[in-house]
Amino acid sequence: MKNIADQKLMRRINNKVVIGILRQSAPLSRANLSIISGLNRSTISSIINNLIDEGWVKETTYQSDKVGRPGLLLEINPTGGFAVGIEIGVDFIIAIVTDFSAKEIWRDRIETDPKDGLLAIQEKGFKLTGEAIAFGKKKCIQPLGIGLAIPGLIDVHDGVLKLAPNLNWKDVPLRLIWTQQFQLPVFIENDANAAALGEFYYGAAQGIENFIYIAAGFGLGSGIIIDGNLLRGNKGYASEVGHMTMDPEGEICSCGKRGCYETLIGPRAVIKRVKKLIAEEGGESTILQISDDVSEEFNYDTVVDAARKKDKVALAALEDVGCNLGIVVSNLVNIFDPKMIILGGALNYAKDFIQPFVEKVVRANALQLCQEDLVITNSQLDQDSSVMGVAGLVLENNWNGSSLQNRSNY
């Protein structure tokens, strides 16, 4: 039995190696795959034949630059299957479909209201997911699964959303509910963790084994990749940077505690800082022209736009948030010694104003040795980091032939 198990493990590893090479360097011949992978030709032929039978790899044209008998070139078959990525935010749902090569082939987005409650929002998610699956089936062979990103604490072993304070959801067995609804593998992930995976698979952190993703939106989240693996902690609740305490006497956070970093960094913090500067210090600002009933998201964009026009109040508010974020980043750099820090979410929109202060504070506070080759940059995927990350989880699970990391999430 042990020998059979070892053979299956080796087959999965070899499949992962071959698919990984094809993803990065296709088209390639069987001979080239053998050379690059170090696997003998008979092993490569067996693997490729199986992958072709599965519909995951296809033969294209004959190799034209080879002396002697040309070999058929191979590449990932885009129609071999499709993944659905869903991100449920505080006030929106995004759905995408990617083909088997990870190319996005469909997307949609709808607005939601957290006041509508769990069941109403979930029904909207079901409808959008059904539309995604219907589209995918027209283009690809089969649905491979659904990835679901959500802003909350996820028990990844049981697939249960334990707490989403900004949605007011608690103890929701999301994996069970969505699996029963669609009869497909479902992968549940915290939105910030998903965003880190998105940047790791397809974005700014490709090839980077140690990095930290930090994003501000309605809340403040982070995902930490250590030695190429997502840091989950004991039950999957790790990396809740937004709920580290900055000021024990500070403002009450949505989690119920006082003075969390989430209350000091992000769009809401920017808006509050602007209002305070105007009310308490009599600051003059073009932002005063915006009416009180404008949405918070639009107000944040307005502040950033005002900063681009050299508005002093807007610049001061963004500087304050940038310095607070710099303290967070400095602490994380000293703890984890990452190669890269990626700023995402709403931070991206104000990167020209926030990032310089983050870098300044990090230079002053992080250990010199930890920041020697540190790169602080912005998300390449922008608002799509999370939804691409969970779509990537589905594809990685299939590419890897059932990896232990991802299988624990299904």
Image (cartoon, rainbow, N blue to C red):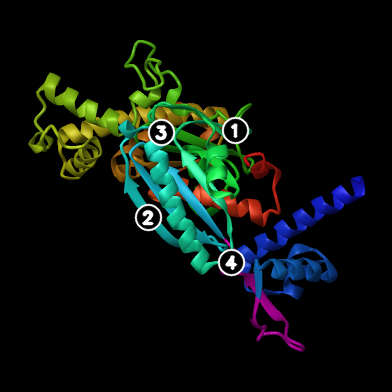
Please identify, in this view, whether the residue under mark 2 or under mark 3 is nearer the observer: 3
- The residue lying toward the viewer, choosing from 113 and 8, is 113
Q: Earlier in the sequence, mark 1 or mark 3?
A: 3
* Residue under pointer 3: 118
> What SS does tag 4 mark?
loop
User: How far, Cα to Cα, is label 4 from label 1?
Assistant: 33 Å
**Amino acid at circle 1:** Arg
Question: Do tag 4 and tag 1 residues touch (Cβ < 8 Å)?
Answer: no
Q: Position of residue 403 (x, y in %)?
A: 69, 47
Mark 2 closeness class: few <14, some 14–19, many ≥20 residues within 10 Å: some
> What SS does tag 2 mark?
strand
**Amino acid at circle 4:** Ile
Residue 189 covered by magenta stretch: no
Q: Position of residue 290 (x, y in %)?
A: 11, 37
User: How far, Cα to Cα, is label 4 from label 2?
Assistant: 21 Å
* Residue under pointer 2: 108
Q: Position of residue 239 (x, y in %)?
A: 52, 30
Start-end of magenta stretch: 59-81
> What SS does tag 3 mark?
helix
Q: Earlier in the sequence, mark 4 or mark 1?
A: 4
Instruction: Answer yes or no: is residue 212 visible.
Output: no
Q: Which mark is residue 232?
A: 1
User: How far, Cα to Cα, is label 4 from label 3?
Assistant: 33 Å
User: How far, Cα to Cα, is label 2 from label 3?
Assistant: 20 Å
Question: Do tag 4 and tag 2 residues touch (Cβ < 8 Å)?
Answer: no
Residue 80 covered by magenta stretch: yes
* Residue under pointer 4: 141
